[in-house]
Image: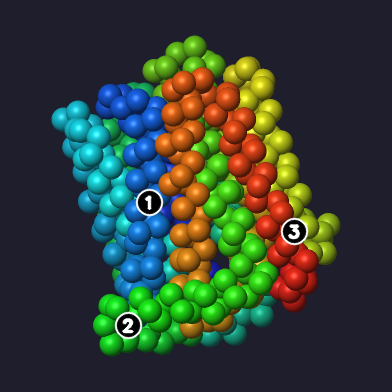
């Protein structure tokens, strides 16, 4: 396997994953509300999803580090396909909230098999095959590819729901995941990494917890970056899902699922452009943390404007700007973090970082969903802007450490 083969495989996996995931992004909150849940219950169900990611990040990190990144990816596709089908069944039978909570947590389990493992597989395999380029370049191109998948999935999923019913995007998602299982089984090979199988689950938990501290929280620039994640992750996931019903409210037709899909497709287009812009930002800003501080600060301002401008077209334009800023920042953050952690612990530390972001979502989603029930979506978005701004001091503290990765 060559470095070019590794990159192509990473792009194919990223495209397929994002296509499958994004098929429901434009309608997920609407789907939950249609099932009879309140805003509080819908976002609480989403909070159980993120709680599942928190709960299962370490165990699935053990799978990636002990059995291989490929095994982790394959388990993720199977788990997500089954739990997505379970979502449709609950919708058909008007399932109780506790069942939505359980199924959402299991969806979180599925995604934790991917978080950290695919990225760790890429970095290790590239280094094993002699790749001499920059990680920013690969992650940025991957952002473009996944943006195309998101564009097709989010836009198509919204219109598919409008013409074939709200369950259709979920059923198609399950089918795409089955296909991705076959693709990964053929294309993925663990390179530059030797699985370490310890003496049992408890021993592995202790080892991974120790490594998360040793190579994560004790490394000062990594620690500050991870402590910013709950604020950015918590605000981002709420805004993403709250925009679906809010835009339909501004549009004046709560059954215009295609418009929700359009908004999600525009976010995907912004992700593509953001991936293309990332290399330019690296020329403008010498330090990676300069890029992160700028994009995070502007993102908070954009969400604030969404809250105070009650116009569908204005908010839609702000959605594009918000997506563009987030997409431009993500490859830079990925490269910055990966350049500060060792290969053998890469999946573990990346999973721990994902866990930190998910923790923020567990807390913010039900609270902001309740705020939306009581006061409406604009005040809840205003609070979201404030939460996301709380990440800025932590990124600044990471910058102050002057890690070599900041200017790599």
Residue 167 in the image: above or below residue 123: above
Report the residue at 54% width, 79% height from top.
214
Q: Which residue is mark 2?
A: 203
Image marks 2 and 1: residues in contact by CB distance under 8 Å: no
Q: CA distance from mark 1 to mark 3?
A: 28 Å
Horizontal side of 205 relative to 284 (left or right) equals left
The one nearer the camera, 76 or 18, is 76
Q: Which residue is mark 3?
A: 396
Mark 2 burial class by Cα count in 10 Å: few <14, some 14-19, many 20+: few
Report the residue at 58% width, 23% height from top.
378
Residue 256 x %, y %: 43, 19
Q: Quadrant of residue 317?
A: top right
Q: Which residue is mark 1?
A: 51
Residue 379 x %, y %: 58, 25
Which badge, 2 or 1, comes first in the chain's sequence? 1
Horizontal side of 104 relative to 332 (left or right) equals left
Report the residue at 61% width, 80% height from top.
131
Residue 234 in the image: above or below residue 161: below
Q: Is residue 395 visible?
A: yes
């Amino acid at each position: 396997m060559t470095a070019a083969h590794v990159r192509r495989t990473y792009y194919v996996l990223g495209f397929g994953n994002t296509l499958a995931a994004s098929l429901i992004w434009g309608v997920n909150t609407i789907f939950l509300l249609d099932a009879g849940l309140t805003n509080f219950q819908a976002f609480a169900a989403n909070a159980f999803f993120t709680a599942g990611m928190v709960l299962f990040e370490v165990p699935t990190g053990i799978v990636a580090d002990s059995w291989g990144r490929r095994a982790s990816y394959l388990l993720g596709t199977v788990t997500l396909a089954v739990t997505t089908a379970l979502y449709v069944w609950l919708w058909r039978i008007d399932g109780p909230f506790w069942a939505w909570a359980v199924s959402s947590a299991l969806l979180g389990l599925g995604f934790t098999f991917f978080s950290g493992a695919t990225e760790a597989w890429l970095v290790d395999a590239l280094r094993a095959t002699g790749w001499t380029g920059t990680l920013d370049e690969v992650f940025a191109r991957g952002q473009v590819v996944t943006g195309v998948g998101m564009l097709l999935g989010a836009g198509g999923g919204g219109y598919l729901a409008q013409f074939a019913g709200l369950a259709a995007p979920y059923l198609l998602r399950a089918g795409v995941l089955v296909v991705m299982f076959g693709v990964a089984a053929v294309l993925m090979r663990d390179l530059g990494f030797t699985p370490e199988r310890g003496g049992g689950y408890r021993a592995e938990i202790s080892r991974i917890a120790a490594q998360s501290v040793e190579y994560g929280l004790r490394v000062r620039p990594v620690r500050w970056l991870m402590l910013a994640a709950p604020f950015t992750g918590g605000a981002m996931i709420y805004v993403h899902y709250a925009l679906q019903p809010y835009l339909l409210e501004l549009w004046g037709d709560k059954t215009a699922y295609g418009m929700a899909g359009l908004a999600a497709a525009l976010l995907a287009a912004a992700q593509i452009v953001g991936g293309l812009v990332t290399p330019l930002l690296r020329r403008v800003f010498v330090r990676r943390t300069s890029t992160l501080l700028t994009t995070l600060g502007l993102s908070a301002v954009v969400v604030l404007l969404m809250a105070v401008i009650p116009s569908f077209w204005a908010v839609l334009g702000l959605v594009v700007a918000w997506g563009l800023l987030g997409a431009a920042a993500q490859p830079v953050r990925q490269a910055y973090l990966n350049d500060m952690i060792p290969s053998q612990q890469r999946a573990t530390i990346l999973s721990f970082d994902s866990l930190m972001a998910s923790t923020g979502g567990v807390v913010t989603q039900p609270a902001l969903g309740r705020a939306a029930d009581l006061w409406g979506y604009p005040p809840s978005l205003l609070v979201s802007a404030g939460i996301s701004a709380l990440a800025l001091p932590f990124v600044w503290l990471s910058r102050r450490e002057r890690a070599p990765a900041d200017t790599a």
